[in-house]
Image (cartoon, grey):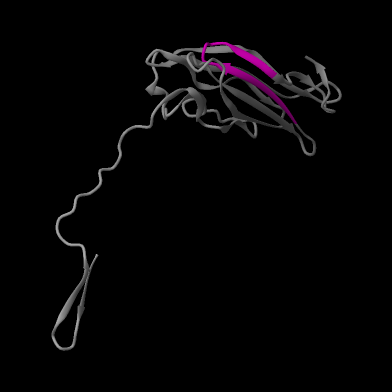
Amino acid sequence: VCTMTVKGDGSSELGTCEHGKFGLSARNTDPPAIDPSTVVEIGKAIYDAVKDNQPTLNTTVDWAGAVPEGVTSWTQLENWKGPVQSDSYYIEFKNFVGMKLTKFAWRFAWKYGGDVKGVGQYVTEAGIEIDTAYAYLSEHLDVQVQSLKPVNYGTSAAPVGGVDIQVSVSSHGLFEKTTKVCTMTVKGDGTSVLGTCEHGKFGHDDSAVVV
């Protein structure tokens, strides 16, 4: 800023005036520091796998990961393994006479073992693979996948990243809508833990008839 007072008698008075040559502060382009012991989530937190009976899952972009804080892409890590798949799970809805109305079958899948210069084991491309998506003509099937709770299941010195993958299956006809949920924790060492999981066959009154 430079200021001058100019007067009617032809004189002037220079006020505060920053003039001359100035340098520009260099922008900090250093990448964020990576903390292997703190696990954060990358990828998509929630997405549709089936919408109104039509599979919409795109495994190229529909996935989640559990990686070290400071990492923005799973490609920054090395030594990935997999993908590994879980057993198959299914949710099937029947009416009161036993006729199948909707059915969704899937497997949890994820890549594991990625590390930061030999430290840690992390998760990427965690989600599901669809085995079956069926709906009777009068029914509507919707499936949503959500990733939750990125956690370090190891230690500060030997981190093991993990994340919960939750599958919500909804079925409805003209009136009644029922939703069942199944959750699995997938980990960077290639293991998994099945959490609360409503799977099997269900009647129209929401009570399980076969598991």
Would residue 164 be counted in the magenta stretch? Answer: no
Q: Position of residue 176 (x, y in %)?
A: 80, 36
Task: Write the residue at 66% across / 22% down.
Answer: 183
Horizontal side, residue 159 vs residue 32: left or right: right
Task: Write the residue at 74% across / 21% down.
Answer: 198
- Residue nearest the observer in this picture, 7 or 120: 7
Q: Quadrant of the N terminus?
A: bottom left
* Res. 139 in view: no
Q: Main secondary structure of the magenta part?
A: strand
Task: Write the residue at 42% across / 14% down.
Answer: 119
Report the number of numbered marks.
0
- Residue nearest the observer in this picture, 127 or 174: 127
Q: What's the magenta region?
A: 179-195
- Quadrant location of residue 21? bottom left
Q: Is residue 35 depicted above or below 79 in this figure?
A: below
Horizontal side, residue 177 vs residue 39: left or right: right
Q: Quadrant of the C terminus?
A: top right
* Res. 157 in view: yes
- Residue nearest the observer in this picture, 125 or 67: 67
Q: Position of residue 16 (x, y in %)?
A: 23, 68
Q: Is residue 83 depicted above or below 203 in this figure?
A: above
Q: Position of residue 87 (x, y in %)?
A: 63, 11
* Furthest residue in direction bottom, as rendered: 9
Horizontal side, residue 147 vs residue 36: left or right: right
Task: Write the residue at 67% across / 28% down.
Answer: 168
- Quadrant location of residue 103? top right
Would residue 192 be counted in the magenta stretch? Answer: yes
